[in-house]
């Protein structure tokens, strides 16, 4: 098997002709600015705060928290490469690593060697870029913290299923026992424990000698080894082990790690595995398979229909909460009862209702009103949103859905997963503990994978999830203890919810990515140009609002499509929605007509309204219904006495008093045309309506009280901010400035300098004011750089390398290599100055 491309060593600046770096800091120092910028972009946590020099950067890159975060962002093959490095000698060679991954030549098991050969350079380059691996190809070194996390230890196997080495396992073993093992294995006897361990290790790593030893093993012993070879490598033995176990123990093929516990040494396991560190190697990402293919026009039309339905659903939700929505729980969020009521109002399921509520909340369309009896209500932003064209309203919703970290799927245990907070409470819609910082990345990645399929193709969900698991095999840091015990990894669950939510929003149609959905991803981020492109593609596909309905003789009206907003609002007062779909059916009832009369409309107004907006003649039954309700409307008058009923027809009042159903209202006659009640006016009004009468409320002045829906709004409130997964990725400007600052700080800390007699190496220089002034003036004349100690106005001490340009008036003006700019420093704040051995 050949090794790899000969120019690979030159890529990291550490070929055979160059001296190998002795530390990660030296390896980073050999990188160019572009490579350092790539490291800081891949691991933005290293920038908080900006390291003072490359030694600080290397130290921070090796901390446990930072290494864990970096490992969690590796794909499966790169992670498997790191795991193989963790069980390889330190340092190791590229060829040894390749052998651990590909296995012995000629082996029929494991991944194809050529595939591994092709993929390994990219994995090694990724580990180098993220500063998890350093050194030339002949001396590859995994960062110590990563090795500690991935390497096996006594009582703990590695992720590869391998146990500790012979040397690690026998560290506490007595020399006599080691001698017994060496003798039983047929090795030359030695009284030196180090030599005994070395000879045993050499035996286990010699393929021919090891094969000869195993040929002598009892069949039961070989069966034991086969059960331990792929891990876990630990087993239990009794004080008096069976003969086949004794054979393995005597020859060191099983070594004790604790009383009653034995382990298969790593070297022996690798021989049994054919030299492979992994049982199943995945050097190539699994492909996302298409499940079905559709014509692009069908996909776009279906997605556009879903987009319009999404707008209608959000509008219906906000209309339902227009006069004030449900109360806010003391712990925050909606109660399950209110969520069920909202789901019934939207004619959907509770999980989907939770999604729509969370979407409106993320868009800033609803919020709590902040009152003493706190309720949810629409925000002023809702009125602004309603005035936008339909395609722009859709783009606003998708724009907040993509980066949102609030995960509606967690509400009330959707998909049977655990849905309780760390405090043990059930997670509620609009409540706390719903943020999952992994959600935006997963959503975008799912849509990007859909975009990679042929146009009009919908994905096979299982292959899509397999691809996501390959790209991020480790459980993400965003997965909190709140999700402990979930039957499925959080990223996989978010991916499933993304497929459902994208279809609900009209980003996809029939499971395939639409053209307007694809436009949102073209810029790689949600930007105004991407939104404008999506709006331009979606707008022609949305139906135009209609200004007419079709009246039918069965007291219904059919809206064959979406209605213009004024028409829809007026019709929703005059009639009740009976069914929804491609066409909406409204039904006229005595109650709905009375509702329109209560809102101030007259019978003639209603007749004119229907005549104007109906493409069919107004049916006679509907005209009769309006006239009949209007004739009775207001015949009875309700006011506040506590409450009273007045009517010019004293016979009608007598009929009310005689009706047993009026007993609860506790009515009595004050005058032939007036009844008094001990109920409040609203209860009296409702009670008489339930008895079949059509009373009208009146004002204290005796006029008919016109009631209209009162739109309640919260104070202006901003939408919730997404909770990021770690520090944000720095932009180009910040990266350039950070790399420059780190380089300058490294120059200040590594440039050789002259020390005064008795001065400790590395200490800030200390000189008198006269010596400081003289050295600065001399540096101006020679143009050389100097090293200074400086204390700023806040009292913070620092060291800098500067090239003095001018000294006057108690100030020195110099080019500061640390800041990469010209600065002026007060001389009285300079604690000392030292000349450099070489020019900076």
Image: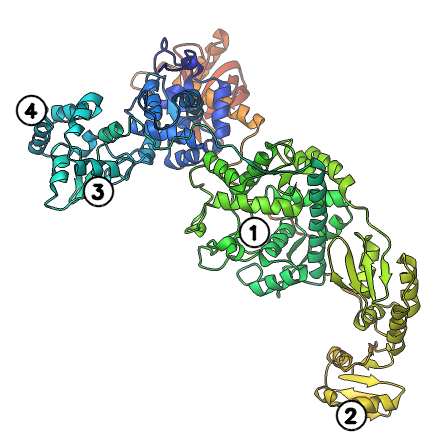
Q: Local crowd at mark 2 within 10 Å, few (<14), some, or many (≥20)?
A: few
Mark 1 and mark 4 residues within 8 Å of each other at the beta carbon: no
Name which of mark 4 and mark 2 comes first in the sequence. 4
Q: Position of residue 359 (x, y in %)?
A: 63, 50
Q: Which quadrant holds the C terminus?
A: top left
Between disc 4 and disc 3, whose residue precedes? 4
- Camera-nearest label, 4 or 3: 3
Q: Earlier in the sequence, mark 1 or mark 4?
A: 4
Answer left or right for 677 relative to 169. Answer: right
Specify the label residue 658 is tagged with: 2
User: From the viewer's perspective, is the residue at label 1 or at label 4 nearer?
Assistant: 4
Taking depth in this image into account, of 336 and 242 the one nearest to the observer is 242
Labels 2 & 3 near each other (Cβ < 8 A): no
Give the quarter of the image for residue 320: bottom right
Local crowd size for mark 1, using a 10 Å CA cut-off: few (<14), some (14–19), many (≥20): many
Q: Which residue is mark 4?
A: 189
Circle nearer the viewer, 2 or 3: 3
List the residue tagged with mark 3: 235
Q: Earlier in the sequence, mark 2 or mark 3?
A: 3
Select label 4 or label 2 by which is in front: 4
From mark 4 to mark 2, how far is it between C-alphas?
Answer: 118 Å
Q: Do the residues under discs 1 and 3 have CB atoms within 8 angstroms?
A: no
Q: What percent of the width, then of the height, locates residue 61?
A: 40, 30
Q: Is residue 825 visible?
A: yes
Q: Is residue 769 visible?
A: no
Q: Point out residue 471 in the picture as x, y percentages from the top left corner.
A: 47, 34
- Quadrant containing the N terminus in the rendered view: top left
Label 4: few (<14), some or many (≥20) within 10 Å? some
Using the numbered discs, state the Cα–Cα distance from disc 1 to disc 2 in whole angstroms. Answer: 55 Å
Horizontal relation, residue 257 to residue 378: left or right: left
Locate residue 117: give its quadrant.
Answer: top left
Please give the residue where the numbered disc 1 appears in the rendered image: 408
């Amino acid at each position: 098997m050949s090794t790899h491309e000969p120019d690979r060593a030159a890529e990291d600046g550490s070929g055979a002709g160059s001296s190998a770096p002795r530390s990660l800091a030296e390896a980073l120092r050999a990188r160019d600015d572009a490579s350092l910028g790539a490291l800081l972009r891949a691991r933005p946590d290293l920038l908080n705060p900006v390291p003072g020099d490359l030694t600080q950067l290397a130290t921070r890159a090796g901390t446990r928290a930072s290494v864990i975060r970096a490992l969690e962002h590796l794909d499966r093959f790169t992670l498997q490469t790191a795991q193989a490095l963790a069980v390889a000698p330190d340092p190791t060679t590229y060829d040894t690593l390749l052998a651990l991954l590909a296995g012995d030549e000629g082996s029929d098991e494991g991944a194809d060697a050529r595939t591994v050969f092709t993929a390994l350079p990219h994995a090694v380059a990724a580990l180098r870029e993220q500063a998890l691996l350093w050194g030339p190809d002949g001396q590859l070194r995994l960062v110590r913290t990563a090795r500690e996390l991935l390497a096996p230890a006594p009582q703990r196997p590695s992720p590869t299923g391998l146990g500790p080495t012979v040397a690690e396992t026998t560290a506490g073993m007595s020399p006599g026992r080691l001698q017994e093992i060496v003798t039983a294995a047929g090795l030359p006897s030695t009284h030196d424990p180090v030599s005994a361990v070395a000879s045993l290790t050499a035996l286990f790593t010699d393929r021919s000698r090891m094969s000869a030893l195993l040929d002598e093993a009892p069949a039961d012993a070989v069966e034991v080894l086969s059960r331990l070879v792929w891990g876990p490598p630990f087993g239990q033995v009794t004080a008096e082990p069976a003969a086949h176990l004794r054979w393995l123990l005597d020859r060191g093929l099983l070594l004790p790690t604790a009383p009653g516990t034995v382990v298969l040494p790593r070297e022996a396991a690798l021989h049994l595995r054919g030299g492979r560190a992994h049982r199943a190697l995945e050097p190539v990402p699994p492909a996302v398979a298409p499940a079905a293919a559709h014509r692009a026009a069908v996909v776009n039309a279906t997605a556009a229909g879903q987009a319009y339905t999404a707008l209608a659903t959000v509008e219906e939700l906000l209309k339902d909460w227009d006069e004030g929505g449900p109360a806010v729980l003391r712990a925050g969020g909606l109660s399950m009862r209110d969520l069920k009521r909202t789901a019934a109002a939207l004619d959907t399921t509770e999980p989907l209702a939770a999604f729509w509520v969370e979407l409106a909340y993320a868009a800033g369309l609803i919020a709590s009103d902040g009152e003493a009896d706190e309720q949810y209500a629409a925000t002023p932003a809702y009125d602004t949103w309603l005035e936008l064209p339909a395609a722009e309203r859709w783009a606003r919703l998708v724009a907040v859905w993509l980066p949102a970290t609030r995960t509606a799927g967690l509400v009330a245990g959707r998909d049977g997963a655990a849905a309780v907070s760390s405090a043990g409470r059930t997670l509620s819609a609009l409540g706390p503990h719903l943020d999952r910082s992994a959600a935006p990345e997963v959503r975008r990645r799912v849509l990007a994978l859909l975009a990679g399929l042929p146009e009009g193709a919908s994905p096979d969900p299982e292959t899509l999830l397999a691809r996501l698991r390959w790209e991020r095999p480790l459980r993400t840091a965003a997965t909190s203890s709140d999700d402990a015990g979930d039957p499925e990894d959080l990223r996989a669950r978010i991916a499933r919810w993304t497929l459902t939510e994208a279809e609900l929003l009209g980003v996809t149609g029939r499971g395939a990515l639409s053209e307007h959905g694809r436009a949102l991803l073209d810029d790689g981020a949600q930007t105004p140009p991407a939104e404008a492109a999506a709006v331009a593609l979606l707008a022609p596909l949305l139906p135009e609002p209609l200004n007419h309905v079709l009246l039918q003789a069965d007291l219904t009206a059919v809206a064959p499509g979406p209605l213009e907003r004024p028409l829809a609002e007026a019709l929703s007062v005059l009639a009740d929605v009976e069914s929804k779909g491609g066409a909406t059916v409204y039904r006229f009832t005595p109650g709905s007509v009375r509702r329109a009369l209560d809102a101030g409309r007259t019978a003639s107004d209603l007749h004119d309204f229907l005549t104007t907006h109906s493409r069919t003649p107004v049916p006679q039954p509907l005209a009769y219904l309006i006239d009949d309700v209007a004739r009775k409307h207001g015949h009875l008058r309700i006011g506040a006495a506590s409450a009273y009923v007045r009517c010019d027809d004293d016979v009608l009042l007598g009929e009310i008093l005689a009706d047993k159903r009026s007993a609860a209202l506790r009515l009595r006659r004050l005058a032939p045309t007036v009844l008094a009640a001990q109920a409040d006016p609203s209860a009296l009004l409702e009670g008489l309506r339930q008895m079949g009468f059509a009373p009208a409320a009146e004002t204290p002045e005796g006029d008919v009280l016109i009631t209209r829906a009162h739109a309640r709004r919260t104070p202006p409130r901003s939408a919730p901010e997404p909770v990021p997964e770690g520090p944000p990725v720095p932009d180009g400007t910040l990266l350039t400035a950070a790399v420059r600052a780190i380089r300058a700080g490294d120059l200040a800390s590594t440039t050789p300098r002259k020390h005064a007699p008795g001065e400790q190496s590395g200490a800030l220089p200390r000189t008198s004011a006269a010596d400081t002034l003289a050295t600065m003036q001399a540096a101006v004349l020679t143009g050389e750089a100097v090293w200074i100690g400086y204390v700023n106005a806040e009292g913070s001490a620092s060291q800098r390398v500067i090239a003095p340009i001018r000294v006057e008036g108690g100030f020195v003006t110099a080019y500061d290599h640390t800041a990469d700019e010209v600065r002026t420093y007060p001389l009285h704040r300079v604690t000392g100055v030292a000349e450099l051995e070489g020019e900076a």
